[in-house]
Structure formats: structure tokens, C-alpha cells
Amino acid sequence: MRARHHDIADDLRRQITTGGIKPGERLPSESGLAAGYKVSTATLRSALSVLQGEGLVEKIHGKGNFVRHRPRQITYVGGWGTLDPWTAAETALRVTDQATQVEADGHLAALLRVPNGSPLTEYLSVSYEGDCPHSLARIYVPGGPEPKEALGNGPSYLHTEASFAVLNALSAEVREIVSARLPTPDEASALRINPGLAILAITRIAADTAGRVLEAALLVFPGDRVEAVFTTHHALNERQTQA
Amino acid sequence: MRARHHDIADDLRRQITTGGIKPGERLPSESGLAAGYKVSTATLRSALSVLQGEGLVEKIHGKGNFVRHRPRQITYVGGWGTLDPWTAAETALRVTDQATQVEADGHLAALLRVPNGSPLTEYLSVSYEGDCPHSLARIYVPGGPEPKEALGNGPSYLHTEASFAVLNALSAEVREIVSARLPTPDEASALRINPGLAILAITRIAADTAGRVLEAALLVFPGDRVEAVFTTHHALNERQTQA
DNA sequence: CAGTGGTCTAGACCACGCG
DNA sequence: GCGTGGTCTAGACCACTGT
């Protein structure tokens, strides 16, 4: 049996993808649509939730349902790569960044291989494409505050471009642990995505030759906008590179 | 304002995680729970949908809501790795496998860098942990059927262990594209997961030194059970290895 | 303030699984 | 047939946004 809300979702999706309703435009109100389709608001809302899950529609409380701009696909490149150069150059990523001192708790202590309670510096950043946030990064470095000349003051544009690259050039090994899950409510609101949209979570550990962890980064990307690429080369005398 | 269904979800989650309701057990019926919490069935169902999204509860139509077994975490290792050895050895992965001949369509043709309509061999496999499926793999190799001695007949146990490793030892480069999304209805039913549970999708391309693509693999893992690890080494004369 | 989405109710009827 | 979840209704009231 075909559920009514699926038919409605299909109809709205067709209107959106064929350009009948354009990106950025507001859909009719939920009560209006419900009346139009002759269904209850609950049914109409479950139709919209399908489209939300597909990232086609963004709901804004008190304003309406809006057709999302088809997000530019961003590529996260594993290892020593950073964001795809074409994309990074094209979109003028803006980053709000802040550094704070924290203590290593259980999980972070294990990641960084430092004792519980060790001092860490946390860099928190959100990157934007236009006015739409598209990634969260929390980067932890063992030890206290960096010298000011390295970090910079105020909104540090220098730090901006490094946000997704490994901070420490001395690192000899980068390990990236990738998982897929739904966002926490905090992450969903920070990224302005629907709680039903999958995210790509990457935990990146950079270590030196002695196995000391130089940096741990917790990265969160919306699944509909970002894919991660890892390239591995086989030959002995060849170091891996990225596209 | 705290939504009632979140409170209920929290309460049920606590009962599950503290062992009040054990894995495999059935929860009281939705109408029973709704009566117990003095809410409507719709509210109670939205509480359950929170737990479904977390993978704690599995709904089975006509039977009830069941607490899921906390899945053993599986690690997919990028590059030349395969599944984490400890896990693979421990859990006796069983695989249903089948090989068919297909033609390269647009997407596959691009991945494999072959003309549209080229012959491909498709290996389709589902791996199980116990009686619970935990991954889907579609592997495409250019060309027609392999010689029988290479592929084997019947339920090929040999092929089983190779399902997540790169098939062709001649490959010089492996590229893995990782994304997070919700499963298609097909994938959700094949993996027996809720449609709201994020999956980790990995497209793996193995090429030889001449850039010829030897194999393309489309892998799908439930996000709550699998994480992928990629390790990159820096030094020039060092080849990368996996943990 | 008016209009929007967010949550919730108290039912109804349908589809599935099992005895 | 009976109990389960799946879908849906026709409202109600609350919370958020903009004027």
C-alpha cells in the first residue's frame, strides 16, 4: 500500500527538481499545502520530513519551508590533503575560530595519549560557504597556549585555511577514523541542518615518528555536501599523494 | 520547552542502557506504553523513533519493538587493509555471494573508465554477523566471467574473506570515496536497519600503475556498527601500513 | 499582532505476524 | 482472529519570526 505522504513527497520533489519551485523560495505554508492535498497537517508534515531527510527542504520555525540550494559538493581529502583546492579557492571559506584551554577528559586523553587532566588547547571552528555553515571542527593540541605570533589575535584568518589541514608539519602519521551517524542536536543547529540528515564524522590523529600525538581533530560534515577521499599507493618507494 | 517525547525517549533509553530491558527483549506495546506514560500513541511513537535513529530499538511490524543487541563494532581499514583482523577472526563472517554479468552504465562506466555498455562482472555480497546482516558489497570488475578456478563454484568461501579486500593484487593505487547518507529503502531492508539510521558508503577504486581501473567496489555499512580507518604515512621511503 | 512551524490529542482504519 | 505496528484525521495549543 502506497502511503499518501510518499505521493505528496514525490509530487513536491518533482516540483522542486523540475524548477517549479526554485532554490531559496518558500513553499506554501504547511496548512495551505495540507488543504491543497486534502490531507491533515500531520500527513503533510511527514511528507515534508521525507524531503528534509533528502536535504531538499529546510524548515525554519516561524518562517516556512524553503527549497535548499543544491549544495556545492565539497571533497575532504585524507592524509596530508585539505579541502579540494578547486572548491576551497572558489568558495572563500570563512571561519569563525576560537581557542580555549581545556583539560583532557577520558576520551580526549585516550585519543591524544596523555594523562587525564593534562592541559590541552582546543580550537573550535565553523566554516561557512556564503552564509551557510558547512562544517564543524574541534582540534585539540597537547599543552598550553601557543605563542601569540603563531596563533594570531582576533578572528584569525591565517588559521582559517589550516582548519582542515594537519596543523603540525612534523607529523609522520595521520590516522583518520570515519563514521556515519545522525547529528547531535547541537551539531544540527550549529550546521543548520535537519536532525535527520546524516553526517560524516572524522576523527583525525596526527602523530610524529615517536608515536607522540601532535593533534587530534574532530571534524563533522553534513553528509549531503561532503565526501572524503583517501588515496593509498602501493609501491615501496612512492609516497602517497592526493588528487 | 522540553518536548514530552524526548523525556519518554530518555526514560526508555535509560531502561535499556541500564539493563532494565535487555537486548532481544520486546518492549510493551505502543498502546500500552502510551497508556503508561499518559500520552497519545503518536507522541509515544515519536519517542520510539528517536531510539530507532540511535539504533537502540528495532521495530517489527506486527510483532513489536525490540531492544537491539549492541552490535560489535567493526572496523573497515582503508587502503590494502580488510576488516579488522580481530573482528574478522572472531565473528565468522558468512557471506552470500553471487556473480553476474552486467553492462557498464553511465555511473559505473565513469568509475571504471570504460566505455558505456562494456561488459562487467558484478559480485554481489551480503555479509552476516550471526544472523544479522551487517554489510552490502557490490564489486565490479571490467570484462567477462573469470575462469572457474579463480572464482570457484557454489557458495564460495574463498571469496568470502576477500570481499572487503581489494581483489586484484596488481593494483597500485586504491582510492576510497567515503560518504554518509541515509539508506535507500532497498539497502535498509537488505541490512535490516531502520531507514533513519545513517550508513557509511564507500566507493573504492583500485587501479594499476597505468591508471587502468581493475575494480570498483560499492560498499555500504550501517553507521552504528562500522567505522573506517585510514592511515597515511609521510616519509618518502616508507610505505603505508594499517593497524 | 498575524502567520508560521512544533507538539500533542483521542480517536479511526489498515497491514502484518502468528497461532 | 487477535494483537501488533503503520497511517491518517481534525482538530488544539505552544513557540518562533516579522511587522
Image (tube, coloured by chain):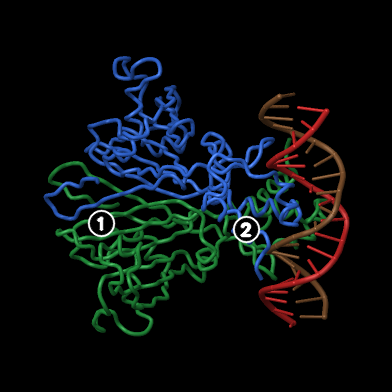
Chain colours: A green, B blue, C brown, D red
Task: List the residue tagged with mark 1.
Answer: A174
Q: Is residue B176 left or right of residue B65?
A: left
**Looking at the image, is B7 positioned above or below residue B150?**
below
- Give the number of marks: 2
**Mark 1 belongs to which subunit?**
A
Residue C1: x and y in percent read 82, 80
**Looking at the image, is A66 positioned above or below residue B117?**
below
Q: Which mark is residue A57?
A: 2
Q: Work out whether residue B95 or residue A150 is closer to the camera in this orientation and state it.
A: B95
3D distance between C-alphas at marks 1 and 2: 36 Å
Q: Which mark is residue A139?
A: none
Q: Is residue B234 left or right of residue A24?
A: left
Residue B7: x and y in percent read 63, 61
* Displayed quadrant of residue B62: top right
Q: Residues within 10 Å of mark 1 (few under 14, many from 20)?
A: many
- Looking at the image, which residue is at 54% across and 37% down? B192
**Looking at the image, is A55 positioned above or below residue C14?**
below
